[in-house]
Image: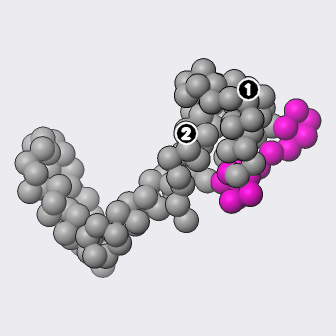
């Protein structure tokens, strides 16, 4: 699965705010992105149809059905498949090769790799 940029904007508000009404969600989208009410409701319905959120009465309360972590994992999987020919190690090599990682971030990568190694 994959969230489009517009769907992600809807979900970001739900992830931050938790359950909220469609009306409040549309108002926040209008404030943050300048979306018209109809655009916001179209995107809410699209997210609902795709199973990313549920909308219930009373008040058309919207609740995320997909976590931010799940959406991040989908995006990462797609990046690995489309940009790195399905190879996660090429992604990591690209990150390290750019030399934009701090010592702390590199240490965290080592820690994660060691944890993964222990699990196998």
- The residue where tag 2 is placed is 9
Residue 86: give x, y in percent of width and height.
Answer: 31, 76
Q: Residue furthest right?
A: 58
Residue at disc 1, secondary structure = helix
First in residue order: circle 1 vs circle 2:
2
- Residue at 75 percent across and 48 percent down: it is 45
Quadrant (top left/top right/bottom left/bottom right) for the C terminus: bottom left
- Secondary structure, mark 2, is helix
Judge by depth and name the residue closer to the eye, 67 or 33: 33
Res. 27 in view: yes
72 vs 9: above or below? below
On screen, residue 79 above or below 103: below
Screen quadrant of the N terminus: bottom right
77 on left or right of 107: right
The residue pinned by badge 1 equals 24
Residue 64, percent across and down? 67, 46
For this rendering, which residue is in front, 116 or 61?
61
**Residue 10 on image: x %, y %:** 61, 40
Q: Which residues are magenta?
A: 47-60
Q: Is residue 54 magenta?
A: yes
Find residue 87 and report its horizontal and vertical position in percent: 26, 74
Location of residue 60 (image quadrant): top right
**Is residue 6 on the magenta stretch?**
no
The residue depicted at 85 percent of the width and 44 percent of the height is 56
Q: 10 Å neighbourhood of mark 2: few (<14), some, or many (≥20)?
A: some
The residue shown at (59%, 42%) is: 11
Q: CA distance from mark 1 to mark 2?
A: 14 Å
Q: Is residue 78 left or right of residue 25?
A: left
What residue is drawn where x is 55% and y is 39%? 9
């Amino acid at each position: 699965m994959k969230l489009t940029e517009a769907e992600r904007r809807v979900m970001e508000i739900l992830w931050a705010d938790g359950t909220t009404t469609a009306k409040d969600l549309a108002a926040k989208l209008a404030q943050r992105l300048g979306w018209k009410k109809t655009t916001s409701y179209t995107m809410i319905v699209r997210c609902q149809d795709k199973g990313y959120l549920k909308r219930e009465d009373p008040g058309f309360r919207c609740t995320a059905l997909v976590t931010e972590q799940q959406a991040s994992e989908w995006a990462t999987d797609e990046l690995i498949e489309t940009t790195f020919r399905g190879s996660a190690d090429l992604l990591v090599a690209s990150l390290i090769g750019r030399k934009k990682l701090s010592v702390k971030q590199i240490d965290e990568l080592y820690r994660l790799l060691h944890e993964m190694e222990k699990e196998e």
